[in-house]
Amino acid sequence: MTVLVCRSCRLRDIPAEGVRPGSRLLDAVTKAAENTGITVQGVSCLANCRRGVNVAMLRDGGWSYLFGKLDEESAGDIIAGAELFATSADPFMPFRGRPQALKRGLIARIPTFDHLKDLP
């Protein structure tokens, strides 16, 4: 289970110089993930700047998820959602039990290549 945090997200009302909110979220999520077995990694851009700060979740055999409108206070919810997704019996993150920050912040759910072969 991997959580990708957009470290370049800065939001419109934040000056370009200084520590960006994406970097602060990366630090908070990394700390929240300690001793959980969840991998957290910063990425340069998730290309969803209007709805930042953004996080993606990836799991072997599972669909990928992109969430936005997150902040440092969302770090616990992000890890709780990642744990829920990691233990799901199917390739989806269950809606029931998903933290509110991830329910309202869902941007996209992206299928695996294996699921695409079943589409017309």
Image (cartoon, grey):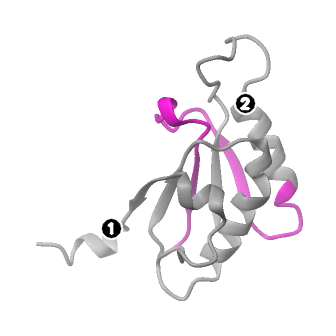
Place of residue 27 in the rendered image (x, y in percent of width and height, measured from the top left): 82, 42
Residue range in magenta is 32-61
Does residue 37 show up magenta in the picture? yes
Neighbours of disc 2 within 10 Å: few (<14), some (14-19), many (20+): many
Neighbours of disc 1 within 10 Å: few (<14), some (14-19), many (20+): few
Going 54% across and 77% down the picture, which residue do you hit?
94
Quarter in which the N terminus is drawn: bottom right
Place of residue 35 in the rendered image (x, y in percent of width and height, measured from the top left): 89, 68
Indicate left or right for 59 with 42 as reference. Answer: left
Place of residue 73 in the rendered image (x, y in percent of width and height, measured from the top left): 79, 47
Give the distance between the C-alpha atoms of the residues marked 1 and 2, in whole angstroms: 32 Å
Pick whichever of labels 1 and 2 is earlier in the sequence: 2
Q: Residue 34: which quarter of the image?
A: bottom right
Residue at the disc numbered 1: 113
Whether tag 1 and tag 2 are in contact, CB under 8 A, the answer is no
The tag on residue 67 is none
Out of 87 and 97, give the one closest to the viewer.
97
Going 71% across and 41% down the picture, which residue do you hit?
71
Indicate left or right for 25 with 45 as reference. Answer: right
Secondary structure beneath dot 1 equals helix
Going 68% across and 42% down the picture, which residue do you hit?
42
The tag on residue 21 is 2
Place of residue 101 in the rendered image (x, y in percent of width and height, measured from the top left): 64, 55
Does residue 116 show up magenta in the picture? no
Decide: is 109 above or below 52. Answer: below
Going 79% across and 70% down the picture, which residue do you hit?
37
Tag 1: amino acid? Phe
Decide: is 109 above or below 51. Answer: below
Secondary structure beneath dot 2 equals helix
Out of 89 and 60, give the one closest to the viewer.
89
Tag 2: amino acid? Pro
